[in-house]
Amino acid sequence: MAATNDTALAGFYERLHSNRMMGLWEMFSAYGRNVRDGKLAEPAQIWRWRDVYPLLMESTEIALDPRAGVERRNLVFTGKDAGLGSAVPTMGCGVQSLLPGESAQCHRHDAAAIRFVIQGKGAYTAVEGERLYMEPGDLVLTPHWTWHEHCNEGDEHVIWMDGLDSGFSMMYLKAQAWEAYPERRHPEDHAVGYTRRRVGTGLVRPVGRIPEPTLPLIYPWAETRDELLRQKEQKELWDPYDGFLVEYVNPATGGSTLPTLSCRMQLLPAGSSTKSHRHLSNYIYRVFRGNGWTDVGGQRLEWEAGDCFIVPQWIWHSHTATSEDAFLFSMNDQPIFEPFGLHASEAAD
């Protein structure tokens, strides 16, 4: 007999759930509440630099000691309902600090990672035996399962943003391998600039196929900035939804930054606003320079340099720069959706 009263219905659901089952209608009900209208039901997520920076400075009092489990001084941003160590379900991010003279043990892991430099000079990330010297605004790649280490040879405190596909690779796929190099440092196998010389200038490069699908690259801020300023001057490439926008591409394939991550930088001139749109990919933004606000699912989220905020999938959003030009760095998971034909975007008007 069909359950017709509240007591019988409650008993039915208890028996159903105790046998690790649920009704399809329960899933649809939960899915329907999952912001399908493009609005946020809860406060937008932002990590403000004025809150993060003092805690990062305080963390420098913690000595780097692998024996105590402190390999790197990294503060991880934990998003609501995103999973352990993730800012959004597919991606993790945080900030890492390296004082003058410090270094981090050479290691490798399944998760692919990026480093976006926030402040300081004199440090490098070495990937597969090639040193990539970092300056503010540079983007550095450490592809999946590549040996990498960090070292600060200078006299400045160096800070960068870490971004990883860890939510996808480690949580969903359970690809969780991590390995320390037998020695603290990897041999310096290549001269500085080796990979950059291999990939050439974009229009010309050394003859021969590049077999690796991903490369240990550094994208200098000076080149990214100059391209965006050229776009601003010429005005022809203005995107109504993202302003002046560039993607950090894989020069070997012409595809996304990494197989699971796309990184971008956009310039919003002072006083400009973009139109509202939404997409299935999740975005993590870091304000490199400038100030302004973003409408995230109907909520006004004001930001300034150093802040990090999230635009979840399928949420309407638009950006406004206020008193000065704004440069927004972002990473997204669009490459995960595209091979399956699942990525979608929509304009509000």
Image (spheres, rainbow, N blue to C red):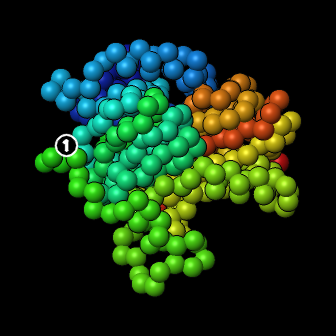
Counting the numbered discs, the total is 1
Left or right of 292 in this view: 76: left
> At 23% across and 55% down in the image, what residue appears?
187
Q: Amino acid at mark 1?
A: Arg
Picture coordinates of residue 83, whole percent (x, y):
38, 32
Q: Quadrant of residue 153?
A: top left
Label 1 packing within 10 angstroms: few (<14), some (14-19), many (20+)? few
Q: How far across and how far down the image is residue 336, in percent?
A: 46, 56
Spot occupied by residue 299 in the image (x, y as percentages of width and height): 71, 26
Residue 321 appears in which quarter of the rendering? top right
From where the camera sits, is residue 296 visible? yes
Q: Is residue 203 above or below residue 173?
A: below
Q: Position of residue 129 (x, y in %)?
A: 29, 57
Residue at figure coordinates x 36%, y 76% from the top left: 211
Left or right: 48 as drawn, with respect to 162: right
Q: Nearer the viewer, residue 169 or 181?
A: 181
Residue at figure coordinates x 28%, y 37% from the top left: 104
Residue found farthest to the front: 155
Q: Is residue 96 left or right of residue 287?
A: left
Establish if 253 lies above or below 266.
below
1 or 70, which is in the foreground? 70
Q: Quadrant of the N terminus?
A: top left
**Regarding mark 1 in the picture, which secondary structure is present there?**
loop
Residue drawn at the location 83% of the way across and 48% of the way down: 349
Query: To which residue does mark 1 refer?
Result: 184
